[in-house]
Image: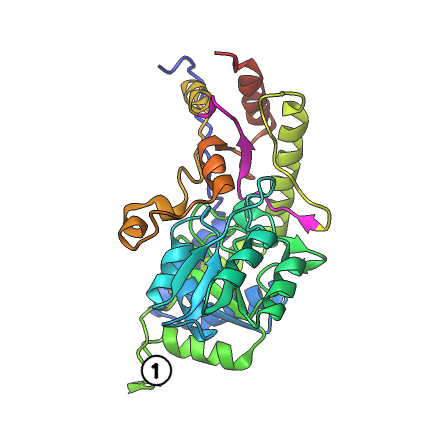
Amino acid sequence: MRTTSQHEIPIAQPLITDEEKRRVLDVLESGQLAAGRRVAEFEQAFSAYVGAAHGIGTSSGTTALIVALQAAGVGPGTAVITSPFSFGATASAILHCGARPVFADIDPRTYNLDPQAASDALARTPGARALLPVHLYGLPCQMDALLQLARAHDAIVVEDAAQAHGAVFGGRRVGTFGAAGAFSFYPSKNLTTGEGGMIVTDRAALADRARVLVNCGQRAQYVYEELGYNYRMTEIAGALGCAQLAHLDARNARRRRNADRLRAGLSGLEWLTLPFEPPGCVHVYHQFTVRVPRVRDRLARHLADLGIGTRVYYPQPIYASPLYRRLGYGDTHCPEAERAAREVLSIPVHPALHEAELDRIIEAIRRFDARG
């Protein structure tokens, strides 16, 4: 039962400025609503921001993943090593290419794909020729180890960077390590266009094929070169993206300051494990995810009663879903992913938070009795 009259603190809150609203109105008044000049501007600006030669706008993060994989050469007969601890689009994109996901366990500190588990999965899986690591919660994967592994097995790497806009590993922004990277611009992301996605790559041939696939299989109008999709980004999304990109670094910096404040305020609680940021990584805190053994759900109810939003990302590994059980994944077992699914809880860290709200979150968690 709600015990406070204070306003609710949501788990996510998109920031939309007057400038962004004006740009959307400009698009509506222009009459050009499909992919056009504004999408092209956003593609160029975003790819330059992450440090890639090419950007291809798409209708969502899911469609960006599907096309990135397909344009990189993933197709029927390919086994793709990936994480089971992610949003379902990571694995479903592999299935949409006619390929087969192979789930490898996660590092319990980072929640990202464990390079040793990925190595074991590659060694035991015939036809495994691709890796799809996920930069979960805004924290980069250990890309040096994963790239070394990929080279040893002649495997393609495509990065799922849906939650990691601006995250850095070894001085380099994520999305630029593999053959391609895929981003999402869903409302809760660090940069949003409402819905939308982006493929980034340095490979001209991959970019060219991705553009054809996104545009109904056409390079020239009504000339269909292959079976493509209508996965184009809208002009409204392109206009929003350009405006949002100008604020991304400042908003990421605010997320990091909020994370520092939460970490300092919540330190010393023996029953609570705080997020880990390995050396050489810049975490952009799409989520601030704590680990709470035994009493996770009770803590979530306690915070809800105090008007503080939380979310479990994710309550089960992907392979435990009905679709994957029907596809024969019933015997899959990744102990660390399963333990994380029982224990993780994300609390607000977004850049719209005020100091008083951060104090409320900290005080509420410190008041929680974890002994019950």
- Residue 151 place in picture, x, y as percent: 62, 70
Mark 1 belongs to which amino acid?
A: Gln
Q: Which residue is mark 1?
A: 218
Q: Residue furthest front?
A: 124
At 54% from the left and 80% from the top, the residue drawn is 204
User: In which quadrant is the N terminus drawn?
Assistant: top left
Q: Is residue 293 magenta?
A: yes
- Residue 248 place in picture, x, y as percent: 58, 52
Task: Look at the image and tell me whether residue 25 can be seen.
Answer: no
Q: Nearer the viewer, residue 328 or 253?
A: 328
- Residue 235 place in picture, x, y as percent: 40, 65
At 57% from the left and 69% from the top, the residue drawn is 153
In the structure shown, which secondary structural element does the residue marked by tag 1 occupy? strand
At 38% from the left and 16% from the top, the residue drawn is 2
Magenta residue span? 281-296
| Mark 1: few/some/many CA within 10 Å (<14, 14-19, 20+) | some
Which color scheme does this rendered protein use? rainbow
Say left or right for 12 vs 329.
Answer: right
- Residue 332 place in picture, x, y as percent: 40, 48
The image quadrant that residue 169 belongs to is: bottom right
Q: Nearer the viewer, residue 72 or 154?
A: 154
Q: Is residue 153 magenta?
A: no
- In this rendering, the answer to whether 147 lies above or below 264 is below
- In this rendering, the answer to whether 238 lies above or below 248 is below
Q: Nearer the viewer, residue 351 or 109?
A: 109
Q: Nearer the viewer, residue 166 or 122?
A: 122
Task: Look at the image and tell me whether residue 265 can be seen.
Answer: yes
